[in-house]
Image (cartoon, rainbow, N blue to C red):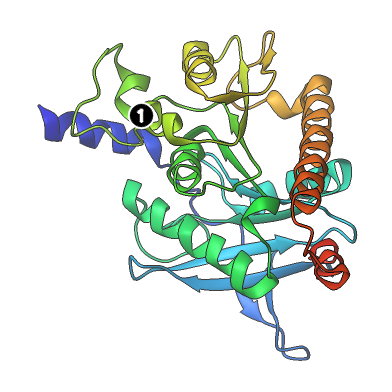
Amino acid sequence: MGNLTSNVAAKFAFFPPEPPTYSVRTDEETGKLTFTGLTPDKNADVHLLETKGGNTVVATFWKHPVGRFTLLYSHGNAADLGQMQELFIELRAHLRVNIMSYDYSGYGGSTGKPSEFNTYYDIEAVYNCLKDEYGIKQEDVILYGQSVGSGPTLHLASRLPRLRAVVLHSAILSGIRVLYNVKLTFWFDIFKNIDKIRHVTCPVLVIHGTNDETVDFYHGKRLWELAKDKYDPLWVKGGGHCNLETYPEYIKHLRKFINAMEKLSFTRRSKRQSSDPGLSESKHNRCLTFGR
């Protein structure tokens, strides 16, 4: 029964678009990686990253010229980077943030097969790229998980104590709980978000549609209740599972959230500086110029 249920949950979780909506190639003139089939963006970098699972995942970094934070976005189960490009461009412009996005193993141009643990290896590789390639600090990262993307998001968030914030968009309590109304967490379940969110110490914003027919509204409500540092949730009245971005309150609430995180970041930085009389001016300047 356990193996059967786990297989059913895994089948629910992963629907890579077939065929992929893009491919990766090397530009002959610049030597940089680019996407074929998509409109190029001069402020976007394409990466091929090796994971601990032995796969190569595709990641893109969408740069904003004055972005204070970086949104590390884990998308839903039936999309790839090509389908998400338009949304990322809109979020970058309206929220004034950098966007780091990636395709799970087996999605788009990423190799391997999709699985729960591969998504964990995938997001870890992408986060390490943010640190190593762009010098972005944990305090300046906001993890964003949509639907099944809430799994890798909360996996990483539970391990980063200085993370700026987390956004859970149409998130799941666990894989089995999408299919069955169970009270206990079974060992064969996948994406045990109901347990991991208890270890997240940063502010958490939950966004969920009240008419979500794929992941019941209860999932979002319960995750918000379990969060230690709750931010005002966005319950989209009449919203489904895949259309919340079309509601005007979506971008408005996200912008309000980003502004609140900027104020929180400034307040905490000011307190640290005032409590450290030995902090030099040069260190202060380097802190303000993290962007590349």
- Dot 1 amino acid type: Asp
Which residue appears at 72% of the width and 90% of the height? 28
Residue sticking out furthest to the left:
1
Residue 264 locus on image (x, y percent) = 77, 37
Whether residue 92 is situated above or below residue 64 in the rendered picture = above
Residue 273 locus on image (x, y percent) = 79, 53
Q: Secondary structure at mark 1?
A: helix
Instruction: Out of 203 and 114, give the one closest to the viewer.
Output: 203
Total numbered badges shown on the rendered structure: 1
Instruction: Out of 190 and 4, give the one closest to the viewer.
Output: 190
Instruction: Out of 108 and 131, give the one closest to the viewer.
Output: 131
Which residue appears at 69% of the width and 24% of the height? 244
Q: Is residue 220 rendered to the left or right of residue 36? A: left
Q: Quadrant of the C terminus?
A: bottom right
Instruction: Out of 180 and 38, give the one closest to the viewer.
Output: 180
Which residue appears at 61% of the width and 27% of the height? 242
Residue 128 locus on image (x, y percent) = 54, 66
The residue that label 1 is drawn on is 195
Q: Quadrant of residue 82?
A: bottom right
Q: Is residue 109 visible?
A: no
Q: Is residue 118 visible?
A: yes
Residue 162 locus on image (x, y percent) = 59, 48
Q: Quadrant of the N terminus?
A: top left
- Circle 1 Cα neighbour tier, 10 Å, few/some/many (<14 / 14–19 / ≥20): some
Whether residue 59 is situated above or below residue 104 in the rendered picture = below
Q: Is residue 96 rendered to the left or right of residue 138? A: right
Q: Quadrant of residue 164?
A: top right
Whether residue 160 is situated above or below residue 180 in the rendered picture = below
Q: Quadrant of residue 291?
A: bottom right
